[in-house]
Image (cartoon, rainbow, N blue to C red):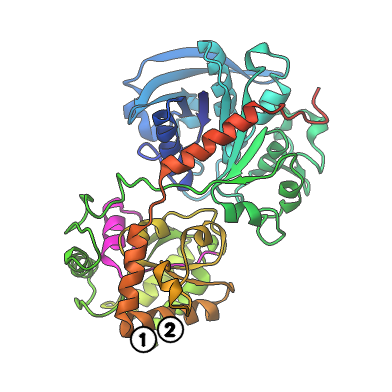
Amino acid sequence: MRILFIASEVEGLVKTGGLADVAYALPKELQKLGHDVRIVMPAYRSLNDIWVQWPKRQFSTKISHFKTETVEACYGAHEGIPVIAIDHPASFDRNGIYDDGQNAFYDNPYRFTVLTKAALDWCKLEEWRPDIVHANDWQSSLAGFFLNEHYRYDPFFSDTRSVLSIHNGAYQMHCDPNWLAQIGIDQRFYNPTDFEDNGHLNLLKGALGFADGVTTVSPGYAAELTTPIGGHGIDFKFRNLNRPIVGILNGCDYDQWNPETDPWLLAQFTTADDGGKARCKLGLQREMGLTIDAKVPLLATICRLVDQKGITYLIPVFKELMAQHNCQVAMLGSGDPLLVAQLEEIQQAYPDRFRFVNGYDAGLSHRIEAGSDAFLMPSIFEPCGLNQIYSLRYGTVPLVREVGGLQDSVCRLSNSERNLKSATGFMFTDMTETALLAETLRMLKVYEHKQTQWKAIQRNGMAKRFSWKKSACQYEAFYRLLLDSPKAVHPLAS
């Protein structure tokens, strides 16, 4: 199959979240399966040193009925995957990807419409006819709309099917309806069933109704999106799609996340008790300025400091742990300045037991995964999550909330002896500080008094594999199903 993969970020080039991991790993695996995959992404200023070396081809793309833009396609490759970077200086030659560091760019609806429309017009320019156009999140969500509406009678795309993948349904792009005409959406689609959402234009909500197929990054999250609690305000839209949402669990790139070969580590290791992980723990304590003590439990968290990650009820738990229990915490993250200030306050009170690094450091993230005993991930919602999967591979026991992809990838320790053969971590359900603290204390009790159980959980986790090949095969089957099915036709399509 010819597969056009449109994404706003790609791991190894530019990344702000999990979308980038998928936009790199999934095309790579699909390519290994024999498919012709092309990634189309923006030519951001931050990557100008790369784009400037690539050959270019200029062409025009029609954004709306009255607006045409001139863009350049920059031709290159990333880890062997063909990449076309859309160079449109007015949209992408600026500091920042989605925002200036504080506020979202006001013209984001237009910027990413340029990307999406140019991706489709590039196919025609090169006479490269895609079987599948795979759009990702709100940034390229309009691909299905454009195929359904703007190119409906274009024989070039007559056999093309569109897929829209939801990596985080909380980000939908609510904007002023004045953008409608500028991004090529006819006024008739501005209604409560499609793009209208409480007086705003909602790109993701409207686009869902035009995709031939909708996927998300775990079975658990697919189910949650259809519920009032988990549907981010548009659960009714997810429930009423013409086809069910398909949940395909993200894989893990074990070329990057493997304790046996990881170049970032002080010591590589094959098992949790071959001495390498113990050395990594002592090295992490030294690097983070924590008291060096092999026996004290070392807990870790790596995340964006946003409400989604459950930080507001993790902070009180950290305070309780520091005040009443013998443990250490190593944390890496950035985001909300108010949350940063609270974490730094805990660090000032317990400098030898609690360390928070404000920012992101790739090497440190690997060393935290390898050197910690347990990883706390109490997300309010989590479409898939990757850190719990990394933790399993590194013998770092995850503690997660029973939500989204976390419940699909971690097997909780119960009170059954038989469960010990499959348990890989700890899990709680209620979205409260009390529930998180109780499960954390239960985990610490096992660590301190039941080391046989703890080592069994570590072994189970390290043996788990979440391969991208398996995920890619599921996407491949889904693509073929769509190609064998009629195109989605919107009731208001002209």
**Image quadrant in which the C terminus is located:** top right
Residue found at x 51% / y 42%: 98
Q: Earlier in the sequence, mark 2 or mark 1?
A: 2
Return the residue at label 2.
Answer: 320
Residue found at x 73% / y 35%: 178
The residue lying furthest to the front in this view is 418
Q: Where residue 109 sits in the image (x, y, percent)?
A: 62, 36
Q: From which residue to which does the magenta span run?
A: 357-379
| Side of 228 where 275 appears, left or right | left
| Side of 454 where 268 appears, left or right | left
| Side of 68 where 490 appears, left or right | right
Report the amino acid beneath label 2. Glu
Quadrant position of residue 483: top right
Return the residue at label 1.
Answer: 325
Q: Is residue 109 magenta?
A: no
475 or 440, which is in the foreground? Answer: 475
Q: Is residue 360 magenta?
A: yes
Graded by Cα atoms within 10 Å as few (under 14), some (14 to 19) or many (20 or more), the crowding at tag 1 reads few
Q: Marks 2 and 1, how far apart in space?
A: 8 Å
Quadrant position of residue 442: bottom left
293 or 42, which is in the foreground? Answer: 293
Mark 2 touches mark 1? (CB < 8 Å):
yes
| Side of 428 where 233 appears, left or right | right
Element at badge 2? helix
Q: Measured along the vertical axis of the image, is residue 338 above or below residue 126?
A: below
Q: Measured along the vertical axis of the image, is residue 476 above or below residue 309?
A: above
